[in-house]
Structures are given as structure tokens and as C-alpha cells.
Amino acid sequence: IQPLDMTDTSDWCQLQLAIATTDGCTNSSSAQGNDIRAAVVSFAGTTQEGEAYTDIAVSVGDQPMQIPSSWGAFRPNELHAMAFLNEKKCLSMEIRSAHVCVGIHIPTYSAMSGDKVNPSTPICKHMAIFMRWFIKHSRDEWSYPYMSELVDAPTDSTPFLSSALYQVVPPIPSSAAGDAFTPSPNLLPTLRRYQKAAIAWMLERERPPHVPSGPPPPFSIVEAVRAKSGVTYNPFTCHFSTAAIHGSAPPWSGVRGGILADEMGLGKTVQVLACILSHPSPAMDHVHAVEPSRVPRRAAANLVERSCVCNCPDDDVHGWIECKRCRVWQHRLCTGFQSSLDQPFYCEGCLRHVDPDWAIPSTLIISPESIHKQWEREILRHTRPDSLSIMTYGGIKALRQRLKGRPSAQWKYCRAPELAKFDVVLTTYEALRDDLHHVSDASSSCLRRRKRYRIVASPLTHVTWWRICMDEAQLVENTQAKASLMALALKSTLRWCVSGTPFSTDLWEVYGTLAFLQVQPPCFQDKAWWRAVMGRFASSSPRLGEVVQGLMWRNEKKDVVDQINLPPQTVETSWLRLSEIETHFYNQQMEECTKHRKPTDSKEITVAMFNSLLRLRQACCHPQVWPTVGSHGLRALDENRPMSMDDVLTEMMLKLLILFDPI
């Protein structure tokens, strides 16, 4: 190890470890007058392929010096990291009296790693390995809330279990705020105590955020701080800093909303309606103080250009109306615009220039198609007549298919002013998915870029909603799905995820939910940060649980059983036997699931095992329930009748004939 000058302590991050000679005497006496700084630190072993350094030795002249057990056993990768960093002039080891001083030269490392530190570069990888050893041996000098994260990356593939997140959220069957809550007189049902407690929490979450005073909470800290020098080290980016850390607000401080995750059957729909009625939007005025610039015509001034949202060029009995900005004529029926001397008419494209973020007092409720009508029925059932105005938005694609290019008053609902007239707008994830093709910026309405048929931009992304509620929010947790991309593009003041099972076994689905809630930095600056901080240590670090704990409300039936008056649960077990055909089919799937698995003594449960168990359970239900694994799967269940066991046998025999006699 090449010694480096560490006299300028301001540039070095140093650690001193005790050392003793083989005979137990002090270094100064055993050196017999020799300069202790002339000691040589050596690593034994080779770094050829398949080998590495295996030991460390210290000697003064011909006399070896013992490495005490308090140092801990050096691993080959730690010794190799020290050797690499010493070669790059970033690390030095020096004998001082009865100690070994290990130091990191921060300016040299920062210069070599660059301004934008890349953790995947060799120098950063070796620094990460060394700093884990360094902090472990000077734990008392460092401040970091999650020491379990300062370890090598986990080598197992233990699946993420959502039940772990549910357990960190304590049940709250009642609260003082809930008991003091008075629901709106427009809400018809009588609320139970646990429902009042949940609504009071929702209303508190919807209040404007405040910046907390004092130190930042532990889960927002990603840098280890050395108290005596003020040096900070980020174990995820491998970046050093000498600047003092300023307290940051909790990741959820800017989130107005959260996750309502009461168990199915506890009345989440009523709780959402109570929140809507108890906290309506303040009044919103839209006055266009600045006159938007006009778009120049492409043709002669006397040419009348027609381009309606319905894409029908024919005349209509209600006549035409001209956009003040682009001077394109549309059917008056399709715009729904009422003549006014005070308000000029702008087409739906030019409205995005006039007011790019049109704030409206409406609540958007997104649900699966299967329960879309149920929301409308529940609103009518649990609220007084005319207390909430409701509108159903089916999407531009569905509207075109239904109207087939005819002028219609229904086209007016593609305009922000029309959506603003309703208290609640209902839509589906399927409509979000289809409207993704109609997300357009304001410049698309320019005449010079107009295509043959008018492209109508989705009104969902033009407006800023007062509140967005996603029912069964786990359906959009995959941030690459079309419905998810559309949901992330929506703007609102308040945001809620409503689901009895908000998270599944995929950690990225948790990311999707929190991304929709727009949890503020540092947690969600980019996916690489999530992968490094949350992804690697989700099972071993409590950081993610502490983030979710402040955002989620969850009660289960067992927590409020005294309030819901359910009869005692009765469990009846009926054992069924598979027929010979079903047994044969199941054994085929079992063989397909296990033939690629090597026998091992490990008790580790992997995601692939969960998938195999799912396929086997489906095979027990019926061979058609799901396209099964391998080449033995049968056609999926569709609109036709289910296959009988004779049909299953016939198809299995056909597959066998094709397999062994393809001609």
C-alpha cells in the first residue's frame, strides 16, 4: 500500500484503529527506536482471475505486527477495494503510534468520479464496498437511520410481500376527531365510528400542507453524516459532500390525499362520498385577462375553414360558430356554446392556449368498467336528490363509435367549461387507456399542422380537477400500462387511491401508487433512485413502511367487529376429487412447472414459485381457466361454453397426435 500525505486533515476522511505487536507490547517499544511511520502495510494474495487478496499484514522492518480481532475479518472484496483506491491515490493507510490510520482523500475521489457520480463505475463500486466497511468500524461517529442498508446488495430473491406494509399501519376503530365530525346533511346513511374516524383523517389529509420544523424524519435521509467533520456520504450514489445537510420536509408533506385501504365491505364508497360533500371546491372564476394571439390563415381571407370535432363537413340546423383565435368554424351544436357578448368563443384546442390548466371544482372518480355503474347507483342511493350532479365520461373513442361522425350535443363534453358544470365526473380505466391516444399539447391545433381529420385532445388532461379518486387503484400500478400513463398525466389538487388491496407482491406497483399521489422528492426523483434505495432493501429496511404509514388508512373487519354487527363466521370445508382426466391434466402441469427447477436445500420462496402455484391452482379449477404453462395448455375460456371433460380429453389427444405425428 503506497503511503500518501494525510497532514491536511480538511481533505481527508480518516479512521484510526488500534494495533498491537505479536508479543503484546506497544508499537513504540517493539519497534526499538525505528520510526513507526516506516511500517509497511501489505495485502497477501493475487488478483488474477478467480483469486483475490485474502489477508492484510503490517510490519516494521522484519518485525510483523498483529492485526487485532477488533478489526473484524477482512473479506477479499474489501481488501481488493482498498488496493484499487490506493492505486488511484484516493486511499491511504498509515501507522501512527498504536493505531492504523485509514483515510479517504475526498477531492481526488470527487475529481475521478466526476460531477455526476455514476454508481456503476469501477471507482464508485470499490468506494461503496470500502465505505460500508469504514462506517461499520466507526459506527459511533456516523449518523444514519437505517444501518441495515449499509450492507452488500442482497443476493436472495425473496419476494416483496404487501402484508408487511399493511402491518405497519395501525388500525384506528375510532378517534376524537371522528367523534367530533358532523357529516353533511346531504349524506343519507348513518356513519359508524370507524367511518367517521376515516373521514376526519381524509379531511385532515386534504388540508393545505405545512412545512414542518425541526430535523427531517428518518425516512427522508439518504446520507450518512460524520458528526465531528460534517462530511456526508450517500451510500446509493457514492457521493461525498462537506456541505451541511438541511432538513427537508417529509416526502408526503406536499401530498394532499392518500390511500384509503379499508378492507372490502367496510363502506369505502360512503366514506369517499362523505369527504366529497364535506369538502367541496372553493369558487373558481375564469377571466381571460390576456387576449390570445390569433393564428394566421393559410388561405385567402375570405375563405371559410370548417373543422368540427365531429369531423362532419355538412351543415346543421343549429348553424356554425367561429373560434376567435384560429378562426375555424365548428357546429354550434357540437360546442354547446351559448352566444354571449362578454365571453368570446374558443374551440377546445385554443382553450388550451387561453388557459392551459383550467381549474374546475369537479371530482373525477375512476373505476373499472365492471363497477362503473355501481358508483352512479351508490351516489344516487346515499345522497339527497340533486345534491351532487353526475356526468359519465366514456372517452373520445367510444363517443366516435357511438355517434358515427354525426353532429351531436354530446361533443360539448370534450370542453373544459362543460366538465366544470358537474360535481362528480365518472370514468373508467378503459376510457383512460383509449384517451391516451388523444393526449395532445396545445400546439396541435395550429392550422399549419392540422391533419385531414380533426384530432380532439382529451379534456381529462386539460383541466385541473379539484379531486381525483382512483377506485381499485392497484389496476394502474404498472407505470408502463396505458391507463397508468394517462392517470399520471392527470392534474388535480387532491388525489386519492381507494382499494382494499392497494399493493400486490410487486414492489414496482407500490411505486406506481405513490407516483400517482405525487409524493415529493427525494423519494421519487427518478426510477433509478427507487431501484437503489427502496428496491434493494424493501425486505430488510423499515424505510418504505414508514413512508406508507403516513399516507395510508386501513381497518379490517376484525378491528371493528363490534361496530358492524356481523354474525359469527361459519367455515365449511368440502373436499373434491379430481376425475382421471383432470388428474392427468394436473400432473402434466405439475411436471411442466418443476422440470426446470434444480433440487436445492434452500427454503427460499421465489416469485417464479408463486406463479407456478397460481397455475396449478387454476388447473385444479378447470383446464380452461387460464392459458396454462408449456405446450400442454388448452385454449382459454372465452364467450363460448366451457369445455366438458370429454372435450378436454379430445383436445389433449389431438395435441398428442400433433406432437408425435405432426404430418
Image (spheres, helix red, strand yellow):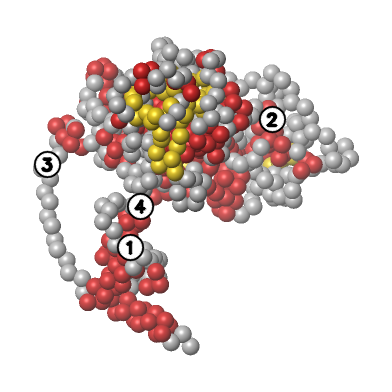
What residue is pinned by disc 2? 353
Residue at image point 25% right, 29% down: 170
Residue assigned mark 3 = 567
Mark 2 packing: few (<14 Cα in 10 Å), some, or many (20+)? some
Residue 477 higher or lower than 281, as above or below: below
Q: Nearer the viewer, residue 141 or 41?
A: 41
Circle 4 sits on which residue? 607
Q: Position of residue 282 (x, y in %)?
A: 48, 19
The answer to whether the residues at label 2 and label 4 have Cβ atoms under 8 Å apart is no
**In the image, residue 206 lies at what x, y percent?**
41, 22
User: Which callout, 3 or 2, points at the residue further toward the start of the chain?
Assistant: 2
- Mark 1 surroundings: few (<14), some (14-19) or many (≥20) residues within 10 A: few
Q: Earlier in the sequence, mark 2 or mark 4?
A: 2
Q: Looking at this view, is 3 or 24 the one in front?
A: 24
Q: Secondary structure at mark 2?
A: helix
> Does residue 138 appear in the picture of this structure?
no
In-image side of 373 versus 458 (left or right): left
Q: Nearer the viewer, mark 2 or mark 4?
A: 4
Q: Give the amino acid at mark 3.
A: Pro
